[in-house]
Image (cartoon, rainbow, N blue to C red):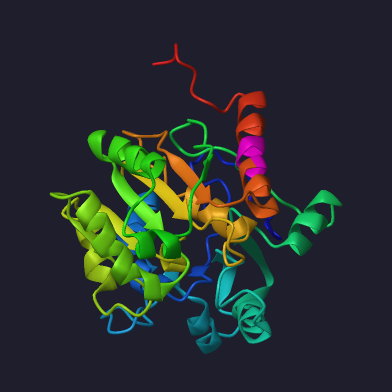
Amino acid sequence: MGRDRGRQNGNDFPAAPAYTGSWWTSSGRYPAQRRGAGTGPATGKGFPGHPDCYPLRGSDERWKEAQLTLATTHQLMRFYQGFDLVIIDELDAYPYHNDPMLAHAATSSCKPDGNFVYLSATPPARLQKEAAQGKLAHAKVPVRFHRHPLPVPHLMKMATVAQCIKRRELPVAMRKSIRTSIQREAQVFVFVTRIAQIEAFVHLMRRTFPGIHIEGTSSQDPDRAGKVTAFRERTIRLLVTTTILERGVTIPRSDVFILDADNGLFDEASLVQMAGRAGRSMDDPTGRVVFASSRRTHSQVKAVAQIRKMNTIARRKGYLHLPNQA
């Protein structure tokens, strides 16, 4: 959604090639600086022939002249009316969300006759309302590139993580469900709410699933990047983590288990983002998602409804891959 007037031209990215000037693709989330190192090569493949720049800390390419620039929103402060098109990814994420300084920096970095595009799977309620009222031009993309439905979360009743740690036992239903994921060779995300619980819960998981390489990570882990890489390379099979990995991490063949899903920290947007870690790859487009909690909450119900709605829209518009299609 956003103020985008890019014309259709038959390209996979119809909006962007309409701009012959400079583009700035920026992310609202702080870890994007680290993530940009991996996103850069993918962006280069998507737009071959366009000079690009990734002004990340320590990069040899900082501030060089380029048509496409990929960086964080904080770096926008260094530019004034420098870009014809500014694309803000994850606009509802920290630190961009509700930060007037960064919003001003983004606005100031765009040329007077330039355009903005805001990207998010979970846009703020204000922007959703403006779009619904026809006040904000927008495009809704209800399907992924592989044209399979988004994985719909299964709601499972379960004791809290704290109770599991205290009892030193994982509920039978959860054990069976995680074992199913392991047996189908999936990479397993396990999201918890509290950093303080990770170490104890990792020990519990290792006792429950011996022989499986299990680790935990959070915003306080200095080796987080290394563990995510090992997880992507399948050296680590199960990763216990927090909302620090709810966005921007793509792990092929992933299943997602969200524990204490009724906790207030996991709002509708957060649940949708975490569920979105599953089913992202072509070789495993379905994936499994479980919301586990002692009670069902409005946020869980709304998150499931939102995912189902996207699938319904994709099906109605004919975007989904049909079984008889090659």
Identify which residue is drawn at 59% across, 68% down: 84
Identify which residue is drawn at 48% across, 67% down: 193
Q: Is residue 241 magenta?
A: no
Q: Is residue 129 left or right of 286 when viewed as pictured?
A: right
Q: Residue furthest left?
A: 211
Residue 116 showing in the rendered view: yes
Query: Quadrant location of residue 82?
Result: bottom right
Query: Quadrant location of residue 83?
Result: bottom right
Q: Which is nearer the eye, 149 or 86?
A: 149
Q: Is residue 120 left or right of 193 when viewed as pictured?
A: right
- Bounds of the magenta span? 305-310
List x then y, in percent, for residue 290: 47, 44
Q: Residue furthest front?
A: 167
Q: Which is nearer the eye, 76 or 272?
A: 272
Q: Residue furthest top?
A: 324
Q: Is residue 185 left or right of 312 when viewed as pictured?
A: left
Q: Is residue 254 left or right of 75 when viewed as pictured?
A: left
List x then y, in percent, for residue 184: 26, 33
**33 lies above or below 288:** below
List x then y, in percent, for residue 213: 17, 55
Q: Considering the image in quadrants, where does the C terminus appear?
A: top left
Q: Considering the image in quadrants, where does the N terminus appear?
A: bottom right
Residue 37 showing in the rendered view: no
Q: Which is nearer the eye, 137 or 238?
A: 238
List x then y, in percent, for residue 160: 48, 59
Q: Which is nearer the eye, 20 or 46?
A: 46
Q: How many marks?
A: 0
Name the magenta segment's main secondary structure.
Answer: helix
